[in-house]
Image (cartoon, grey):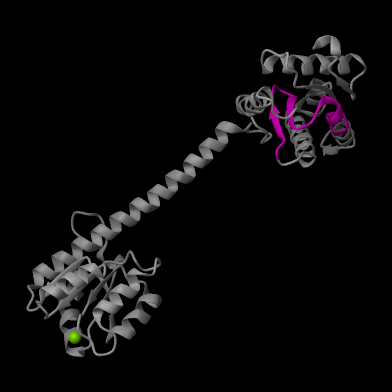
Amino acid sequence: MKQTGINSGQFLVLVVDDLPSNLQILRGILEPTGYELTFACGGEQALDRVKIARPDLIVLDLMMPDVDGFTVCKTLQDDPEFANIPIVFLTASHEEANIERAFACGAVDYVTKPFRRSELLARIRTHLLLKYTIDELRKTKLELLSALRKTEQLARVDPLTGALNRRSWNGRARKIWQRARQGGLPFAVLMLDCDRFKRINDNYGHDAGDRLLCAVVQTIEDGLRPGDALGRYGGEEFVILLPELTALEAKPVAERLREQIAALTLNSPRGTMRATVSIGIADYQDEDPDLDALLNRADNAMYRAKHAGRNCVRLAAQAEL
Ligand SMILES: [Mg+2]
């Protein structure tokens, strides 16, 4: 196709007519255009050909003894798989009722015999280009949607560990906090920090340290319920949102995570790595002015766990409420 950069040979046109002599005439007209051609001698054969060949456009006769053009057109239009194939009627019938019915069946064009060769070719070309453009737009739309989903995902998660990033976790936690504030259910937050992680990075290298961090995250994720949320808060500091649990109810969860992480071993070129974590727990209190107050208590509890010798769990003290 001139001026479009599109190759005519990429289009397959199905020509349907019950008279073989008509098919021959149309072959003679269409062949020089470079379109791929396929033929059907009757309505039934046309429906079969469409399924096998999946043409880009159909030139369709109206009057055919077995299955007429209307039926072929309607059948294809009703099938989502084939509904987007443009159908150009080519017929001797000039009756207005037939023209109306053809368009009502979903045809894109109606050419009457005797026809002008150049006009038929121009119409076919236009409808092929239109279909090509629509197909490309559809493809582009799907690609854009997929890219958008990836971007949204990237904006939500920490690229190293796949845990939620701080902003995204805060958003989730704020919603739960609002709900609790409006008289909803309790919730707890675990503040979890990997112990002496600088030493791990120094001893085993940063790549190995990163792998250990990912393994810790995986261990945590495996131990959480579907509605819980894990966020990376800092370098090796994580927060875990546990909806519907009080701090006391969250303690066994924290202890189990701590044990599972302590049991973790990971090989590196410089030896076997292990990690331990210190965990602070706080839960929602009506007196808290905001979510930060709760996070501060969890953070303080976590530091008490550090001072108590690490690899342990501490609850936010009543004095901190
Ligand atoms: Mg006919």
Residue 156 at x, y = what percent? Answer: 59, 32
Taking depth in this image into account, of 165 and 210 the one nearest to the observer is: 165
Range of residues picked out in magenta: 227-254
For image coordinates 37% across by 81% down, the residue present is 48
Q: Report if residue 275 is visible in the image.
A: no
- Left or right, 114 with respect to 186, comes to left
Q: Is residue 87 left or right of residue 304?
A: left
Question: Does the magenta portion include 303?
Answer: no
Identify the image quadrant of the C terminus.
top right
Q: Is residue 123 visible?
A: yes
Quadrant of the image occupied by residue 219: top right
Q: Is residue 15 above or below residue 314?
A: below
Q: What residue is at 70 percent from the left and 38 percent from the top?
A: 227
Which of the 4 quarters of the picture holds residue 65? bottom left
Residue 115 at x, y = what percent?
Answer: 8, 75
Vertical comparison of 295 with 17: above or below: above
Residue drawn at 78 percent across, 42 percent down = 222
Residue 20 x/y as whole percent: 21, 89
